[in-house]
Image: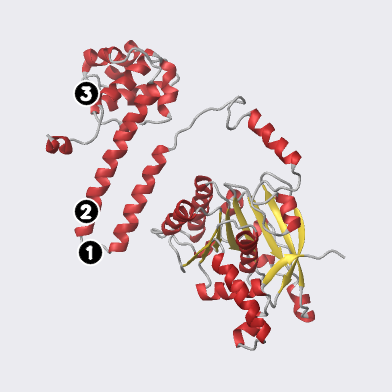
Amino acid sequence: MALLRDSIPPHSEAAEEAVLGAVLLDWQAIGRVIAYLRPERFYLKRNEIVFATMLSLFQKGEQCDLLTLCEELRSAGQLDAAGGVAYVTSLTDTVPTSANVEYYARVVLDSSIRRDLIKIAAEVTADSHDETKEARTVLEEAQNKIYALTDLNNTYDIKDPRDKDFGVLPVINLIEQRTKNREAYTGIPSGLTELDALTSGFQNSEFIIIGARPSMGKTALALSMAQHMALDQNIPVGFFTLEMSMLQIMLRMLTQESKIPAEHIKNGFMKISDFQRLQDAGARLYEAPLCLVDAPNMKLLDLRALARRMVSAYHVKIIFIDYISLVSLENTYNKPRFEQIAEISRSLKSLARELEIPLVVLSQVSRDAEEKEPNLANLRESGSIEQDADVVLFIHRDRQKQAEESPQQLEAKLIVAKQRNGPIGTVKIVFLPQFTKFENLARG
């Protein structure tokens, strides 16, 4: 009995017929079913043909009942393949009402996903025995196919102002809470006071870009923010370093936290008191909720998988990626680089929404921005980054002037060039080159 069951792909004939019968009883139910199903989701060919014909009538703006459905099938020469008039007519006998049509649709979708999983498993088994394919390629293709199936679980719904989670009442409650505690940020604070006042912190599901020319301090700014969040706020932070090694990142973080000049740590010329500060900083970093990934030329698929793991296993609340141009696709198919960056940008934006956390991604800007304030048009390699981003920040420093003066602290501008849900503007901060760290600019 078990062998017979295992040989038949998962499906529910009763649920498929119930979906079709419910739609025939109540044509308005088609809108609810479309959120879950497409014709290829049906196992039985006759049911696939019937549902495809229903969708055809729906797209034409026509009503569907037994008469119009049979006539449409006959005109397309598919009435016999759909089981004939007798079968189509019997569909309304399988279900008394359309009230549970979404439940039936979910059963059909669930069975379809299971069939897809079985198919993928068979393909992976076959590819695994194919010695002409690298194991890494087989793994990447399998992950791609699996992640593609997750999109089938994305259903859509219409909400109104009475919705208990997204309607008027929860928004009013949120406003009341903010009024009671005006100092609180609604998002994750970066540690830069003026920036947080402008953005209310980095918000969940936001795709945030930090752009600058090389050597302006993109990594330093990201690490300054990450350390504030993890050490001062005890917020779990994920950090992908695709440009620098883990050793270099830890060296920078120890320098920032201990406030011992990087040059002294690098060449070993430290005082006795410096060692104590270094140990104290190391102890704080040791206990900090930081997840670091050191991987040059990381594949987008691997990045997405690790980001999901960071959130599920380590409860990470924000992720930094340094930087977008070093993320690569699994299969480029000779795509131009701007198309690759566009695909990566869209994928990272959807990842931020999927994980419901802020995703902060570093990006270089073009040479056109050298020695002047960068703008959105200067984002390198793809205009889609500008379109996809919810917040765009640019770092700007007068490199020539500061090179001549060589001060211990360098005034910098953090330009909020885009903020989808808030104002734009310029924030003044200070860069401490000896510690490779950004801080608030002291007033007066």
Q: How many marks?
A: 3
Q: Quadrant of residue 378?
A: bottom right
Q: In this picture, is 294 found above or below 278?
A: above
Q: Earlier in the sequence, mark 3 or mark 2?
A: 3
Q: Is residue 101 left or right of residue 192?
A: left
Residue at (73% x, 74% y) in the render: 399
Q: Which residue is at 70% across, 50% downward?
A: 199
Between discs 1 and 2, the one toward the N terminus: 2
CA neighbours of label 3 inside 10 A, class few (<14), some (14 to 19), many (20+): few
Q: Quadrant of the N terminus?
A: top left
Q: Which residue is mark 3?
A: 81
Q: Position of residue 73 (x, y in %)?
A: 29, 19
Residue with the mark numbered 2: 125
Considering depth in this image, is 219 or 273 the residue closer to the camera? Answer: 273
Residue type, label 3:
Ala
Residue nearer the viewer, 375 or 432: 432
Mark-to-mark CA distance, 1 and 2: 14 Å
Residue at 38 percent across and 46 percent down: it is: 148
